[in-house]
Amino acid sequence: MAIEGSIGIRASWLIQFALTTLVIAWPGRIFLTRGLPALVRGAPDMNSLVALGTLAAWGYSTVATFAPTLLPEAARTVYFEAAGVIITLILLGRALEARAKGRTGAAIRALIDLQSPVARVERDGETVEIATEALLPGDVMLVRPGDRIAADGEVVSGESRVDEAMLTGEPLPVAKRAGDAVTGGTVNGTGALRVRATRVGSETRLAGIIRMVEAAQGAKLPIQGLVDRITLRFVPAVLVLAALTVGAWLLFGPAPSLTYALVAGVSVLIIACPCAMGLAVPTSIMVGTGRAASLGVLFRRGDALQALDGVGIVAFDKTGTLTEGRPALTDISALAGVDEDAMLADVATLETQSEHPLGAAIVAAAGARGLSLKRAQSVEAVPGRGLRGRIGDRALLVGNARLLTEAGIDAAPLADLARAHAERGRTPVLVAIDGRPVAALAVADPVRPEARAAVSALKAMGVEVAMITGDARATAQAIAAELGIDHVEAEVLPEGKLAAVEACARAAPWPLSVMASTTRPRSRRRMSASPWAAAPRSRSRAPRWCCPRAASGRRSMRSR
């Protein structure tokens, strides 16, 4: 009003006409080029209603500006600002959505950066450095300590430990030797390796992950499908209502009835223009994915954000998720007559053949004591139980009570020691040599500082919390009590993860799995939503981002 008072109504309307025409003809033409053809095909969408509403507002206002005598005096007004604001707000919502995808795209670029740009390969008896894109299947790569492996392959010679945390989330390096598979993008440890490339370029595992995440970003949320179905019926309903309005004014309106009828019909189209419907989903996606992206979280499937709205229980894998994933040997309880250092050296020798985090803790403790390790033979890992093997003429068993019992060894002499360790939240590791129990070791994996706060926040949201672990029940219950977790699935074997997930699903609907590793596909199939892979910087922050992520899903769905 102040502007019209200073320059006059006529000048104000002309300026609005010029500006609105530019808005419709330039940024707003996307609604015209998409919406009008859809209307002609008989399949109107949101673009169709935006096009009709803005054109109606612009057309009516243009008549009021340049041919006002065609309208009743009381109806001589303009709606240029309505047309401009409708287009501006909807395009702003789409821009915010694109911005949110761009932020998540930065995390994808971080994954892309994990690919080594160059590789050192053997060619004609010489070692040459080539671009990773030039690698061919069958090329033998030389991977020095600290190098990032350029492609998926198989170790030809050499021994080392490879950091696979960027793919699995597991914090401890994995032992690799001849015949073992390695993945492009992982980091070699202290030993040199010769690796024969098996999958290169777009065929690598890392490239597949990047493609999958990009596909998830381009997918529509199921709620968007609901909006589209509503729009499919809403647009024809608005057109019918506008036609009925025109007809009613023609039959019952005052003179000039045609003018009043057109004004009323155009008003219906303007008012029905779906600003809220056009903005609700993009804005919700922007808020939810933006919050998740700021925490380095990528969505594996396009509907994961919406699925989080219904999560009733969060099932945490203990090691590396609720705990630091860096266990340390805290106690050695040897029976009378047992040489503690000799026993620890034997156990550490056996554990050098293991990839389990507890084994690494024992090996580290032996190294800290300066103990000399020997060579082990016939080492066998027993899933969910421990290790068996031989050192010289001695047969060793290292693991839990089930391992000893199944071997026919009475573990009763170690029961009280194991129970005492477990009640303090430590994992007991029992040792038997030549059929006789000799010691109970205790390994502790510190609880993450932020884990307790995450559990409390989830409970405050009305979400139940569960913990899944292969630890003994006493150990699991002690850690759960420390964190305030009520539901515990303990002594779970690797192949029992699926059953544990199903147990969580019975406790509350729509379970969410939070794991430190991507190597548990069977259990993930049962989860309504499963955090899978995040940017490398976030893999150690699972408890901290889990709660905001669930909240993002709920807020996104409730904001529509």
Image: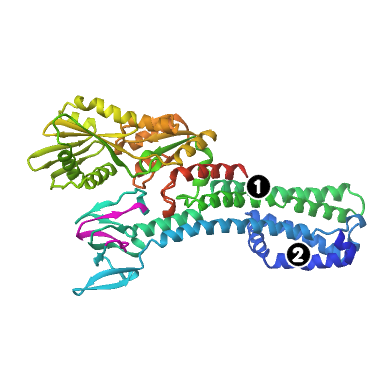
Q: Which residue is mark 1?
A: 233
**Image quadrant for the C terminus?**
top right
Range of magenta residues: 145-165
Asked whether the beta carbons under mark 2 and mark 1 sit within 8 Å of each other, the answer is: no
Residue 100 among those drawn in magenta = no
- Does residue 216 appear in the picture of this structure? yes
Gap in angstroms between the C-alphas marked 2 and 1: 29 Å
| Residue at x 37%, y 54% (from the top left corner) | 166
Q: Is residue 260 left or right of residue 284?
A: right
- Would you place residue 101 above or below residue 541 in this image? below
Front residue of 249/282: it is: 282
Looking at the rendered structure, the secondary structure element under dot 2 is helix
Question: Looking at the picture, which amino acid does disc 2 mark?
Answer: Thr
**Image quadrant for the N terminus?**
bottom right
Question: Residue 313: x and y, percent?
Answer: 47, 35
- Would you place residue 410 above or below residue 188 in this image? above
Residue 153 among those drawn in magenta = yes
Question: Residue 457: x and y, percent?
Answer: 52, 37
- Does residue 489 appear in the picture of this structure? no
Question: Residue 484: x and y, percent?
Answer: 45, 31
Looking at the rendered structure, the secondary structure element under dot 1 is helix
- Would you place residue 199 above or below residue 318 in this image? below
Question: Looking at the picture, which amino acid does disc 1 mark?
Answer: Arg
Disc 2 packing (10 Å; few <14; some 14–19; many ≥20): many
Disc 1 packing (10 Å; few <14; some 14–19; many ≥20): few
Q: Is residue 353 left or right of residue 223?
A: left
Front residue of 215/234: it is: 215
Name the colouring of the figure: rainbow
Q: Which residue is mark 2?
A: 20
